[in-house]
Image (spheres, rainbow, N blue to C red):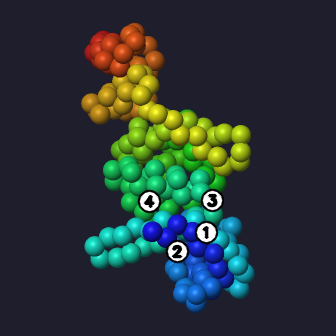
């Protein structure tokens, strides 16, 4: 696996860069707009964190200005319906800490503003990643990841799986009574039927 590349920038395009390493090999890396803004000009030396996506018919290398951006990319790839191009488009909207904040706060509008992401995909991303990215730590761009075993989150996710919107699920779960996810879900469903 190629995890890091350091070398001279040979070419810059809107969606990728080519970096030549000391061995003389040039690697083309697909990058977000955010990463591209931090890559040096042609002829300058730059370093990028990488992730290789291997498919039956292709190998694609993706580059990131920070480890945090790469971690967000990998989290996004773990969501059903989100491929590398959509993940890069999400990361192109600003610094990783902005996307992490949008995920932690449940900002569905920020996600839907990205071409290729509809309401269902945006809600799926939030359901799967909202509790994993709970905010930012003390260091700039540090992303805090947490376990997702909160009973209220599990109950909310259950409601979304049953067809409720994220906003409806949040409303019903916030007024639900109980300690376990099952109790909260039953209470929320009773409230939804009224």
Q: Position of residue 70 (x, y in %)?
A: 54, 58
Q: In which quadrant is the C terminus drawn? A: top left
Question: Which class describes the residues within 10 Å of circle 1: few (<14), some (14-19), or many (20+)?
Answer: many
> Is 71 situated left or right of 96 in this image?
left
Q: Residue at x 58, y 87 (%)?
A: 23
Camera-side residue of 114 and 34? 34
Query: Which of the two residues, 21 or 177, is positioned nearer the viewer here?
Result: 21
Residue ID at (52%, 52%)? 72
Residue wearing tag 2: 29
Can you identify the residue that label 1 sits on? Answer: 48
The percent coordinates of residue 132 (x first, y second) are 49, 39
CA distance separating discs 4 and 1:
20 Å
- Which residue is depicted at the point 40% across and 12% down? 179
Specify few, some or many for label 2: CA neighbours under 10 Å numbering under 14, 14-19, or 20 or more.
many
The residue where tag 4 is placed is: 86
Q: CA distance from mark 2 to mark 1?
A: 9 Å
Furthest residue in direction bottom, as rendered: 24
Q: Which residue is mark 3?
A: 66
For marks 4 and 3 on the same chain, the one whose residue lies earlier in the sequence: 3
Foreground: disc 2 or disc 1? 1
Q: Which quarter of the picture shows residue 86? A: bottom left
Q: Which tag, 2 or 1, sits closer to the chain's start?
A: 2
* C-alpha span from label 3 to label 1: 7 Å
């Amino acid at each position: 696996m190629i995890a890091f590349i350091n070398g001279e920038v040979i070419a810059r395009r809107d969606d990728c860069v080519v970096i030549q390493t000391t061995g003389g090999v040039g690697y083309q890396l697909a990058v977000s707009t955010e990463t591209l803004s931090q890559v040096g000009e042609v002829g300058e030396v730059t370093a990028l964190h990488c992730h290789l996506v291997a498919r039956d018919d292709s190998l694609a290398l993706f580059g990131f200005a920070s480890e945090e951006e790469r971690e967000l990319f990998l989290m996004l790839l773990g969501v059903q319906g989100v491929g590398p191009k959509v993940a890069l488009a999400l990361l192109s909207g600003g610094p990783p800490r902005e996307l992490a904040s949008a995920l932690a706060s449940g900002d569905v509008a920020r996600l839907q503003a990205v071409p290729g992401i509809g309401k269902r995909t945006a809600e799926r991303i939030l359901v799967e990643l909202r509790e994993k990215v709970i905010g930012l730590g003390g260091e700039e761009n540090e992303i805090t990841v947490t376990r997702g075993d909160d009973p209220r989150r599990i109950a909310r996710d259950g409601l979304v799986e049953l067809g409720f919107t994220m906003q409806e699920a949040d409303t019903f779960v916030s007024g639900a009574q109980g300690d376990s996810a099952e109790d909260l879900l039953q209470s929320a469903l009773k409230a939804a039927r009224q």
